């Protein structure tokens, strides 16, 4: 039964949605969306705990693995695929699993989310270990695929966290950390791609970003491990070096080339007035943290 779930109840503010002008509808929807970050705020401590798990996994050579179905699964994948270009991670370090496999990313695979066993199979294919952190996403908090995945992850000793949008959810019972973002009824009853989806997107953004800060992928608020995969990102890297050190864009470009196209190395070279090899050694000693590499 799902009719008792907050995400399935009717929103009193949108009962006449089909009779509203477009302008009035947009105002109502915008007002409902404003509730989302306030609901996320109430879960800050739980999100912090999840970040600690992920950082611990990264330090031990483990991974962050999101698992979900439908919109929730796609949001996990979206966050995962942005980590390599933004933070210079390898493609295995942060991954997303969706019920029904890759084809479910662009087209719903009916019934895939109802199998606990499929989640176990998917995690075994990734060779899940106790070093990893598995984060289950399900707005309803009752998706069998996610329940099965979290249960298996805990059984082998992996860290687990659950992100749902209902209090006392089933997936919370299967996780070490329960993040329950109660955003209230959706604008369209049961359409959890709306406020619930926004809430989950905010939370995974916080988890991955917080974890990357925690392992030295950021200097100040600069993405110093950005991968130079296109012209825009090459220019961004030059800007990052210039902002971090005060050198001109032209000087930043020269240092970037000398540093093997690694902004982090270039910054340490400039600040310590050292060679590429010395900068790399400083960064290794500082566990990748630019700030410590400069000041040690």
Image (cartoon, helix red, strand yellow):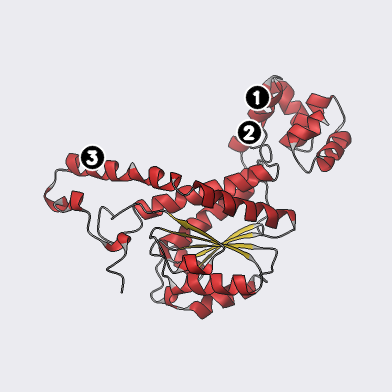
Nearest to N terminus: mark 1 or mark 3: 3
Q: CA distance from mark 1 to mark 3?
A: 39 Å
Please tell me whether mark 2 sits on a helix, a strand or a loop. Answer: loop
Q: Residue at x 71, y 23 (%)?
A: 245
Residue 275 versus residue 58 in the image, above or below: above
Q: Residue at x 53, y 48 (%)?
A: 45
Nearest to N terminus: mark 1 or mark 2: 2
The image's mark for residue 183 is: none
Q: Are marks 1 and 2 in contact (CB under 8 Å)?
A: yes
Identify the residue position indicated by label 1 in the image: 243
Please tell me whether mark 3 sits on a helix, a strand or a loop. Answer: helix
Total marks shown come to 3
Judged left or right of residue 187, residue 125 is right
Please tell me whether mark 1 sits on a helix, a strand or a loop. Answer: helix
Residue 148 versus residue 214 in the image, above or below: below
Comparing 13 with 107, the one in front is 13
Identify the residue position indicated by label 3 in the image: 27
Identify the residue position indicated by label 2 in the image: 222
Residue 120 in which image quadrant: bottom right
Give x and y (percent) for residue 89. 67, 50
- Residue 136 in view here: yes
Comparing 194 with 148, the one in front is 148
């Amino acid at each position: 039964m799902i009719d008792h779930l907050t995400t399935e109840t009717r929103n009193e503010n949108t009962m006449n949605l089909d009779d509203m002008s477009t302008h009035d509808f947009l105002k109502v929807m915008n007002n409902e969306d404003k509730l989302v970050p306030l609901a996320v705020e109430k879960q800050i401590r739980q999100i912090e705990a999840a970040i600690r798990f992920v950082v611990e996994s990264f330090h031990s050579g483990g991974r962050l693995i999101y698992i979900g179905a439908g919109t929730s699964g796609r949001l996990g994948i979206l966050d995962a695929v942005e980590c390599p270009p933004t933070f210079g991670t390898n493609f295995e370090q942060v991954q997303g699993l969706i019920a029904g496999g890759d084809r479910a990313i662009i087209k719903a695979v009916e019934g895939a989310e109802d199998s606990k066993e499929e989640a176990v199979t998917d995690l075994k294919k990734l060779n899940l270990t106790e070093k990893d952190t598995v984060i289950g996403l399900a707005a309803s908090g009752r998706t069998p695929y996610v329940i099965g995945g979290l249960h298996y992850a805990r059984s082998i000793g992996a860290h687990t966290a659950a992100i749902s949008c209902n209090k006392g959810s089933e997936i919370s019972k299967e996780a070490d950390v329960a993040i329950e973002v109660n955003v209230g009824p959706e604008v369209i009853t049961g359409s959890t791609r709306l406020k619930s989806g926004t809430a989950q997107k905010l939370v995974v953004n916080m988890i991955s970003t917080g974890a990357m800060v925690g392992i030295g992928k950021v200097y100040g608020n600069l993405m110093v491990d950005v991968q130079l995969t296109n012209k825009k990102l090459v220019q961004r890297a030059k800007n990052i070096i210039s902002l971090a050190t005060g050198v001109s864009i032209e000087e930043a470009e020269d240092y970037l080339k000398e540093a093997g196209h690694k902004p982090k190395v270039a910054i340490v070279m400039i600040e310590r007035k050292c060679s590429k090899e010395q900068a790399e050694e400083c960064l290794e000693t500082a566990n990748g943290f630019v700030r410590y590499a400069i000041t040690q």
